[in-house]
Image: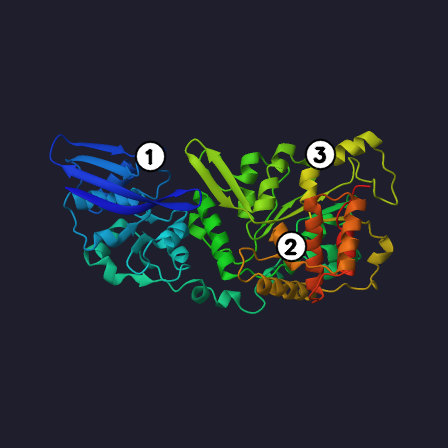
Amino acid sequence: MFHRIRSYCLFGIKAVPVSVEVDASQGLPGFTLVGLPDNAVRESRERVVSAIRSIDKVVTGFRTTVNLSPADLRKEGSALDLPLAIGLLVATGEIEVPDLERLVFVGELSLDGLLKPVRGVLSVAMSLPDRKRDVLVVPRGNEREVRLVEGVRYVCADSLKECVGVLEKGAVSKAVSAAGLAAVHGAERGAGQGYACIQGIPDFKNVIGMEGVKRALEVAAAGAHNFLLVGSPGAGKSLCAKCLPGILPEMTDEEILETTRIHSCARAAGDMECFKPVMVRPIRTPHHSASMVSLVGGGVHLRPGEASMAHNGVLFLDELPEFNRSVLEALREPMEEGLISVSRASGTVVWPARFMMGAAMNPCPCGYAMDAKRNCTCLPEARKRYQEKISGPLLDRIDIQVSVPSVEASQFASGATISETSADIRKRVCEARALQRDRFKNLPFKTNAEMSSEAAKSFCRLSAATERFAISAADKMGLSARGYFRLLKVGRTIADLRGAPAVEILDLSEALRYRSFRS
C-alpha cells in the first residue's frame, strides 16, 4: 500500500517541504531508501524499526520502498525519523490516521520509541503554507519553538506510542493553536527587560574617564554603526565593549523571531533540550583564531557562522589585526548588504547577517604608540605593517573609529566623580531608535546605518552651508564616496540623539572626529 507523509528538511535556515513516500507490498522482504539521504537519514531505518517494535507493532516482512521527494535535494539530519515511522505504520496497515494529508511530521526517534527534539522546528512552523488547515506534529521538546509562531496548529508527543494514540483518535481535532510570541513571552519582555537587568554586564558608571569613548559607543548603539576602538594595552577597550550591551535597545517581535530562527537552525545536538528564544540582542565574540567557515558559515552541513548568529546584535572582534586577513575580508559584503551567500555544488544558501560590527586593536605590535607615558619600541615600518593588516576597504566600512586614551591613576581615587549609568545612556539610545523606526516605518531598513546612498541623500538633507562644509571636509580627509555617505549617516544619528530634525554642522563635526585613527 502506498502513502505519502508530509515533512520538512532544512537547507540553510530555510525549511523545504519533503514528501516521505512509502510503498509496502507483499514480496521478498526488503527495505530500500532513495531520495539522496545522508548518513543520518540512511541510518534512520534501524532507529525507526526498533522504535516501532517497542510499541508492539510489526512492519517487517514487507517489500518496502521509501522515496524522499524531491529526490535531487540532499536530506540531512534526523528530523525525518517520525514521518518515516508513521509512513511505515500506515503503509503496512498497522494504524489508520484520519486527515493524514493535513498533518506535517518532524522529529527524531530513539530505539525505545521516545521522541527527541530536532533543530529548525521554528523554520518549519514559519514555512507552513496554510496555518489554519495544516497541523504540525512535533516532539514535546520543540513545543516552545512552535508556540512562538502565532496561529500555527500543533500536536506534541513524548513518544511514538503517545503520537500514534493521538493520531488514531484524530490529531486534527486535538490540535492546539499557538498563541504567538507576544502572548507567550509578554511577561518576560516587561518593563526593564533587556541587557540592563542581566547579571554580569558591566555598567558605564564604573568606567572612569574616557567620556569621548562612551559618547562614541552611544552614537554607535543609537544608529547601529560599526565601530573600532584603538588604544594601548589596558586602556579599557575591552571593558567599554563589555558595557555596550547595557545600552542596546530591546528587540522587536520581528527581530526576536528572525534571530531565534537562525539560532534554532544552528543548534548542536547537545543544545536540543534547552531551547530558549533569543529575547535580547546576541553578542558574539569569536577568538582571533576563528576560521573562515566558523565566522561566515558553510562547512559540510552548511551551518550559519558567527556573523549570522550575531544577526540583530553585535559581532565583536577583539585584537582585530590578529585575525586572518582573508577571514576579515569575508566580512566586507555582509557589513554592506546584511546577508551572507555561500555557494556550493548542492546549491546556494543565503543567511541573514545584519550585525553591528565592533572591534578593538592596539596601534602597533608593542601596543604603546599612542601611550603618553611609555615609549613605543616598534620601528616605523613594523608599525605601518601592523596597521595595514586592516585593509582600506574594511576600514572604510567602519563608521566610528576612536582612540582610547590611557586613564590617569589619580582618577581612580575614591572621591572620583561617578559617570552616568548605562540606564541613562540607554534611554537616549532608545529615543533615537524610536525616531528611526518612525522615519523608516514603510521602508525595508530600520536604522541609520542600513540606509542606502539614495536614502542618505533623502533623509540627511543638508542646508547649503552644511553641505559645503561636508564636501570640503571630505576632500581634505580624502574620504571615498562610501565614506562620505557614512559620514552623513553618523551625522544623522548624532542629530537624532539631540532630537534635531535636520543634520547641522555641529553633527558633522562630531562625526568627522570618528572617521580615521591613522595619522
Mark 1 and mark 3: Cα distance apart in space: 43 Å
User: Is the Cβ of the residue at disc 1 closer than 8 Å to that at disc 2?
Assistant: no
Counting residues from the start of the chain, the first of labels 1 and 2 encountered is 1
Check disc 2 and give the amino acid type. Answer: Ala
Mark 3 and mark 2: Cα distance apart in space: 30 Å
**In the displayed structure, does residue 32 sit left or right of residue 484?**
left
Asked if residue 57 shows in the view, the reply is no
Relative to 450, say whether 30 is above or below: above
Look at the image and tell me in which quarter the C terminus lies: top right
Counting residues from the start of the chain, the first of labels 1 and 3 encountered is 1
Provide residue 16's location: percent of width, then percent of height.
36, 44
Name the mark nearer the viewer: 1 or 2.
2
Q: Nearer the viewer, residue 196 or 130?
A: 130
As helix, strand or loop, the secondary structure at mark 3 comes to: loop
Mark linked to residue 20: none
Which residue reaches farthest bottom? 191
Q: Residue tagged by mark 1?
A: 72
Asked if residue 79 shows in the view, the reply is yes
Q: Residue tagged by mark 3?
A: 389
**In the displayed structure, does residue 459 sit left or right of residue 86?**
right
Quick one: label 1, few (<14), some, or many (20+) residues within 10 Å?
Answer: few
Provide residue 432's location: percent of width, then percent of height.
65, 63
Q: Residue tagged by mark 2?
A: 456
Q: Residue at x 84, y 57 (%)?
A: 411
Check disc 1 and give the amino acid type. Answer: Asp
**In the displayed structure, does residue 311 sit left or right of residue 177?**
right
Name the mark nearer the viewer: 1 or 3.
1
Mark 1 and mark 2: Cα distance apart in space: 44 Å
